[in-house]
Amino acid sequence: MKKKLLAVMLTAAMAVTTLAGCGSGAASDSASTDAGSTEAAADAGSSDAAASTDTSGSGKRVAVAMPTQSSERWINDGANMKTQLEAKGYTVDLQYAEDDVQAQVSQIENMIAAGADCLVIAAIDSGALVNVEEQAKNAGIPIIAYDRLLMDTDAVSYYATFDNKGVGTAIGKYIVENATKNGNKGLEAVSGAGDKMNIELLMGSPDDNNALMLYNGLMEELQPYFDNGTLVCKSGRTSFDDTCILRWSQETAQQNMENYLTGFYSDEDIDIVASAFDGFAYGAKAALEGAGYTADNWPLITGQDAELMAVKNIIGGSQTMSIYKDTRLLAEKCVTMVEAVVNGAQPEINDTEQYNNGKIVVPSYLCTPVAVDVDNYKSIIVDGGYYTEDQLAN
Ligand code: BGC
């Protein structure tokens, strides 16, 4: 089992290394950007644009609506999209709505009024944009869904994302293979020794289709161990409805964890925090520190996005793993979709079944998420050119 995991990681590491060679050069710059400097990241990208000889997008405007700058991943996503589109000569209007649904609606209305040739949308609330999407359709403006599926609309042409159920599967498999109790590693071994492990779940936003898909992938892996009593959830909150956190709020994650710790863990330690997002892992960390946890009883904590802070925490030991999503690759795939709708080119698609938005099945490209921890972050993240050793050391 472990060998198989290593083989998968090695293959992924090689794939990432290869990609780093042909991807956008601005990505490692943008990955280092902190939450305050979106424009700097975006500007860093425009120098690439100047150097490019591909002007196929010249005279065309692409509007990119992003959800928030409160999480590093979206800053990188926006910067990568701007860089890569400008490198092809497109004019880019990049807007963030700070998790305010109405603000995003207004931004998209303005983008339509300004005469965008294509809209790229990473929604805050995936079902709340139906009217504005209809307006875009009526104005003849094609829409690409970025990372998060746009629900209940036939106005969306393509969807670029990561394998969202695969993210949950990777987190679940990581827990199954690496959770350790009394010297036994992996839930099979823990179960064989007659031990059990306490787990709590921090799941994503109910208005984001990705969150439920992640949960489903995760539970497919964990359910057998709940069923045989190896995993115990003392709060009893294991359903998606009971564990989802609106707008992926780090503060709510911290509050939930504080409530779990005071309500259910006064006489036993929590062993596993199955968190769906690096931001939740930071919230859990703060709650655990507040409750007096130390390296001696620190639980396994998962995450998603491999944010700079998360990888630092993985190196320092306060987070166990994250899911690396190469936003450079996602932007690259999304740009091919923009070109398809604007210039009549053919984008690469690798899924025409999974992403039914309630109206249509949206043709999609799914990038592969990769689990990273202290053992493989160097080969995947540093060798892949996503962060440098220097960034991780400071
Ligand atoms: C993305 C995740 C991200 C989360 C919170 C999801 O839609 O797929 O990568 O962690 O939003 O921002």
Image (tube, helix red, strand yellow):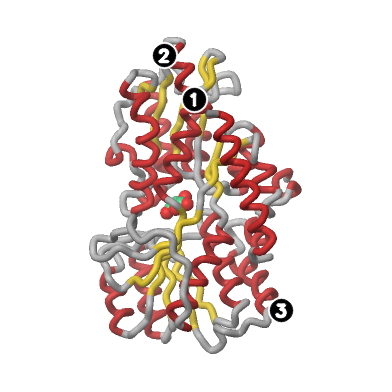
**Circles 3 and 1 in contact, beta carbons < 8 Å:** no
**Left or right: where 45 falls relative to 325:** right
Given the image, on which type of amino acid does mark 2 rest? Asp
Residue located at (58% from left, 31% from top): 3
Q: CA distance from mark 2 to mark 3?
A: 62 Å
Q: Nearer the observer, disc 3 or disc 1?
A: 3
**Left or right: where 238 falls relative to 339:** left
Q: Which residue is mark 1?
A: 291
Earlier residue among tags 3 and 1: 3
- Determine the secondary structure under disc 1: loop
Residue located at (39% from left, 19% from top): 230
Above or below residue 148? Residue 291 is: above
Residue density around tag 3, few if under 14, some if 14–19, many if 20 or more, within 10 Å = few
Above or below residue 187? Residue 364 is: below
Given the image, on which type of amino acid does mark 3 rest? Ala
Cβ of mark 3 under 8 A from ligand 1: no
Q: Which residue is mark 3?
A: 51
Above or below residue 145? Residue 296 is: above
Residue located at (45% from left, 38% from top): 275
Q: CA distance from mark 1 to mark 2?
A: 12 Å
Cβ of mark 1 under 8 A from ligand 1: no
Given the image, on which type of amino acid does mark 1 rest? Ala
Q: Which residue is mark 2?
A: 267
Q: Nearer the viewer, residue 111 or 373?
A: 373
- Determine the secondary structure under disc 2: loop
Q: Nearer the observer, disc 2 or disc 3?
A: 3
Residue located at (34% from left, 84% from top): 140
